[in-house]
Amino acid sequence: MSAASQKTYNSIKKDGIAKPLTPDETQDTSGIRLSYAYKGYRTRASIYERILPDKLTTALCIDGPSGSDNAMTFHNDGRITVMTGARDPNKGAASGKLNITTYGGLHKHEGRVNMEFNEGDNQKPQGDGQALNIICYGDYIDEAKGSERIIKANIIRIEAVEELVLAGGSIKIQSQSDIEMAGTAINSAQINKKDIILGQKMSFGAGEETSIQFDPRSNQSVVSPGHISHVIAGDYKQYIGGVSNITAAGGTFAVPLVKDRFNTYKVKSLLGNTEISSTVGTTSIKGLLVYLN
């Protein structure tokens, strides 16, 4: 008959299931006393009580078949330790695993729970590198009431077969690098929209751009200390329902966009005629000197 090795018990007492909050303690175990209640004849399994030399630390232990190095320990302080044997490919692919099958249940923890998962021997390229895999044949609800949930990883990927919905009282997306979006159509609806751009804003593509506004208060203002340039290969047409007023001050700001500064306001037709007409009213050109060629 063989109990779990002393090295295994020392490892459990040292590390436990999670990292302890208090410093490690040492204890002389040379006087451990065992009281056996059952000793298996065929598998060499055993059930026994264990008491340490301090006469206070006790436990009820169940050790598995000989050579498996698995055990279950009920400690006097209320802890329960479940340990499987080491994974040994010579014993089969399922060696060292803890398998639980139920038809439902309830897990309730009154204190903090720390869980650690390792991929073990399933490393690439032999394995898929997964340390935890959860499959739910139904809805999966994860809720943190009155608190927050933090997910940390080098790469976080969320894949939805049909629809992905992000809903919240306030949604913030922050990135130290680029933010990329791609889709057949991107539709957004908002009451107010504000863009703060400290660098350059560029738009590429051959798509049509249309702005339709129905509210008579929907004014558009362009305020810029720099230059504005329009390069149009096709026609350019404007219809103004009100009054059009253009004032060219002729000042120079930063590096000039127009090199010829002789004319403050200039209109030139490369091909065809130039016409200025008034359907109702008069057309007047005023200046100190007026030249007609």
Image: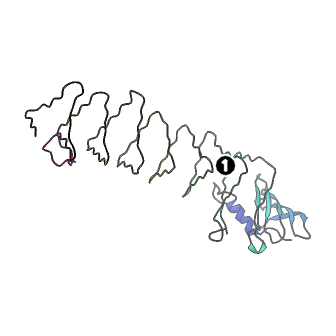
Q: Secondary structure at mark 1?
A: loop
Q: Does 63 sit left or right of 216 as displayed?
A: right
In the image, what residue occupies the spot 21% across and 31% down?
277
Q: Residue furthest left?
A: 289
When asked about the image quadrant of residue 215, the answer is: top left
Does 69 appear in magenta? no
User: Measured along the vertical axis of the image, is residue 172 above or below residue 176?
Assistant: above
Q: Could you say which is closer to the camera, residue 275 or residue 132?
A: 275
* Whole-percent x, y for residue 31 in the image: 79, 66
Direction right: furthest residue: 41
The amino acid sitting under disc 1 is Arg
Dot 1 alpha-carbon crowd within 10 angstroms: few under 14, some 14 to 19, many 20 or more: few
Residue 127 visible at all? yes
Q: Which residue is mark 1?
A: 112
Q: Is residue 192 above or below residue 22?
A: above
Image vertical order of residue 65 relative to residue 233, above or below:
below
Residue 249: which quarter of the image? top left
Q: Please tell me which residue lies in front, 61 or 285.
A: 285
User: Hey, which residue is sitting farthest bottom in the picture?
Assistant: 90
Segment colored magenta: 249-275
In the image, 25: left or right of 260? right
Quarter that holds the C terminus: top left
Q: Residue furthest front?
A: 272
Q: Position of residue 8 (x, y in %)?
A: 74, 67
Q: Main secondary structure of the magenta part?
A: loop
Residue 139 rendering spot, x and y as whole percentages:
70, 46
What residue is rendered at 29% in x and 37% in y?
Answer: 223
